[in-house]
Amino acid sequence: MSKRARRQFSPDEKLKIIADADAASHSVAPRAFEGALSIVDAARDALQDKPSRAPIVDGILEAERRAVCEYALSHPKDEYRRLAWQMIDEDVAYVRPSTVYRVLASAQLLSRWK
């Protein structure tokens, strides 16, 4: 089975859908469908842009960031992958190698040729 791709509507298309729903709600007998306006309001809320997935959060603490930098300075010959696993083995910090790379790159402690 193939998954159906969800269609993304432009803001103009969203406004047209809301306007069509609003026009349809006014064309019926007002007393027969008193809840029609609440449906239009719900449609407006449902058509608002929402993020498609949860934001990615870098969960490293400032103390861990400092520990990574200090450990890297005390082990200048080791690459970031090795540093990550050594820090885990020595209970310095529990961070992934990619996080060690990002921390060292942001602190300008990463060098390509050692």
Image (cartoon, rainbow, N blue to C red):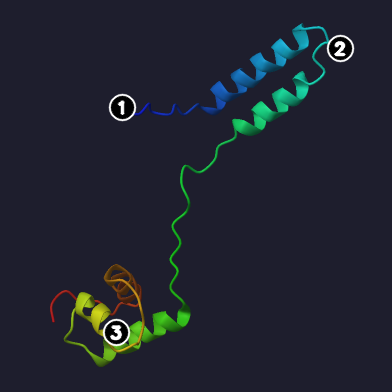
Mark 1 and mark 2: span between their CA atoms? 44 Å
First in sequence: mark 3 vs mark 2: 2
Rendered-image quadrant of the N terminus: top left
**Residue 63, horizontal then vertical, whole percent:** 45, 83
- Tell me if 31 is positioned left or right of 45 in this view: right
Q: Within the image, what quadrant is residue 35 found in?
A: top right
- Examine the image and state in which quarter residue 83 appears: bottom left
Q: Is residue 38 above or below residue 88?
A: above
Measured as percent of width and height from the top left, residue 88 is found at 30, 82
Q: Is the residue under label 2 in contact with that under label 3 (CB below 8 Å)?
A: no
Counting other residues with Cα less than 10 Å from the Cα at mark 3, is it few (<14), some (14-19), or many (20 or more)?
some
Q: Secondary structure at mark 2?
A: loop
Q: Residues within 10 Å of mark 1 (few under 14, many from 20)?
A: few
For mark 1, what is the residue? 2
Residue 87, numbered circle: 3
As drawn, 34 above or below 82: above
Viewer-closest of 55 and 69 = 55
Amino acid, disc 3:
Met
| Comes first in the chain, label 1 or label 3 | 1
Q: Is residue 104 left or right of residue 37?
A: left
Q: Residue at x 19, y 79 (%)?
A: 79
SS of the residue at dot 1?
loop
> Which of the numbered marks, if any, corresponds to residue 31?
2
* Residue drawn at 60 percent across, 35 percent down: 48
